[in-house]
Amino acid sequence: MVMKLKAVVVAGGAALLSLCVLLAVHPAAADAGGYGYGKKSIEDTVRKEVEKAIKRNPGVGPALVRLVFHDCWVNGCDGSVLLDKTPDSSSTEKAAVNNIGLDGFDVIDTIKSKLGAAVSCADIVVLAGRDASAILSGGRITYNVDTGRKDGVVSSAAAADAVLPESTFEFQQLKDNFARKGLTQEELVILSGAHSIGVAHFSSFHDRLNATTATPIDDRYAAALDADVKLQKTRQNTDDPVEKNNIRDMGAQFQRDAGYDATGVDTAAAGALDNSYYHNTLQNRVLFKSDWVLRTDGDAASDLVEYRENATKWDMDFSAAMAKLSKLPAEGTRFEIRKSCRFTNQNYY
Ligand code: HEM
Ligand SMILES: *[C@@H]1O[C@H](CO)[C@@H](O)[C@H](O)[C@H]1NC(C)=O
Ligand SMILES: *[C@@H]1O[C@H](CO)[C@@H](O)[C@H](O)[C@H]1NC(C)=O
């Protein structure tokens, strides 16, 4: 069976179709739960593909980290975020406002095409996010995850928008949102550190640059950001361009204009998943209101200082929080191992 699977992989663009044929021809093998892949072998394949994907397109690394949060938060870790349509709905989680910018689906598809029935799409999301975290942190973020998740068959944009936190939330709303998933205030502070990587659309932080709605933000940073958004509207040819989450990763001129104080930040580590977020937050040089409001609570603010001061502690605690996130149990009643991560099996045939 391993040989046959390899043949499918070589087929490249036609892989999905071939896989379909393969499974139709050998239903017993598919039902038996895989192709003799052990967990180690599954993990190796995922790791290799994530490495390749990030090398090709660094932007996909942050996307894979975020995908864990956005999958596991809605119906638990069940791959529901990956669905393009279900028998009940074509307005799946991907269409949610709070899922703006969500990406990494092609990487998940590629991994699925290599592993077939051996592994659920839900497991792939969690494994790929874990590997992206390890790669982007230079190996400092590591944690174990179990496999054996099943894929859900329900995915709704409205449900995702009802459950995912918004960048304009107040501190108490964020805290309540995390508490509903069994995550603590401290874990809110720890996981928000993921905003040391990746990008955000202007629409996710425009409130911060508007005098009517602005929450405290460093004046020089706000001015530099405002100017750069104007520039990026032209460059990216859109009214809703993206900006980098982390001022560490902006150009030197931007940093000077914004009065960035890089003391204690490893500025050579552009793009790294690390504790630089805490330096930025405590300087009011972060994009989202949801980042800034962490300063407004006494305990959360002391956690921010602790994580700014102790990079190793953040690496360890972020690893543990990601492991916990990756364990949020699926909430549905019907499950399967999908043939394609984008469709329920009922839709696929
Ligand atoms: C605490 C509540 C959170 C809020 C309100 C929030 C909000 C957001 C928003 C609005 C964006 C930008 C989307 C866009 O405009 O394209 C974003 C990006 C991102 N978020 Fe969060 N987030 C939260 C927590 C988290 C958590 C827990 C994680 C990770 C485990 C995470 C990881 C990321 C990453 C990596 C990006 C960049 C994605 C990319 O570049 O593709 N966020 N977040
Ligand atoms: C600023 O926010 C207010 C209130 O939401 C809105 O009416 C106004 O159009 C915004 N201004 C800009 C320039 O977007
Ligand atoms: C940083 O945190 C780690 C883990 O909690 C701890 O062992 C270490 O002593 C801390 N370092 C400092 C300088 O406080």
Image (cartoon, rainbow, N blue to C red):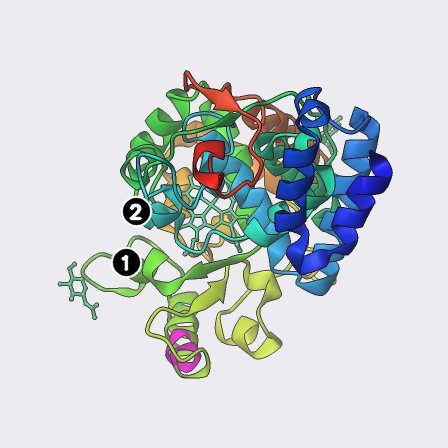
| Residue in view at x 35 percent, y 68 percent | 240
Residue density around tag 1, few if under 14, some if 14–19, many if 20 or more, within 10 Å: some
Identify which amino acid the numbered label 2 is placed on.
Answer: Thr
Label 1 vs 2, first from the N-terminus: 2
231 drawn magenta: yes
Residue density around tag 2, few if under 14, some if 14–19, many if 20 or more, within 10 Å: many
| Residue in view at x 71 percent, y 19 percent | 32
Instruction: Locate residue 205, reporting x and y percent.
Output: 35, 58
Does residue 257 appear to the left or right of 108 in the view shown? left
> What predominant SS class does the magenta segment belong to?
helix
90 drawn magenta: no
Check contact, mark 1 vs mark 2: CB within 8 A: yes
Q: Which residue is mark 2?
A: 168
Q: Is mark 1 within 8 Å of ligand 2?
A: yes
Q: With respect to residue 212, does 290 lie above or below?
A: above
Q: Which residue is mark 1?
A: 207
Instruction: Locate residue 256, reporting x and y percent.
Output: 55, 75
Q: 123 or 222: which is nearer to us?
A: 123
Magenta extent: 229-233
Q: Quadrant of ligand 2?
A: bottom left
| Spatial separation of the CA atoms under disc 1 and disc 2 | 8 Å
Q: With respect to residue 148, does 10 lie above or below?
A: below
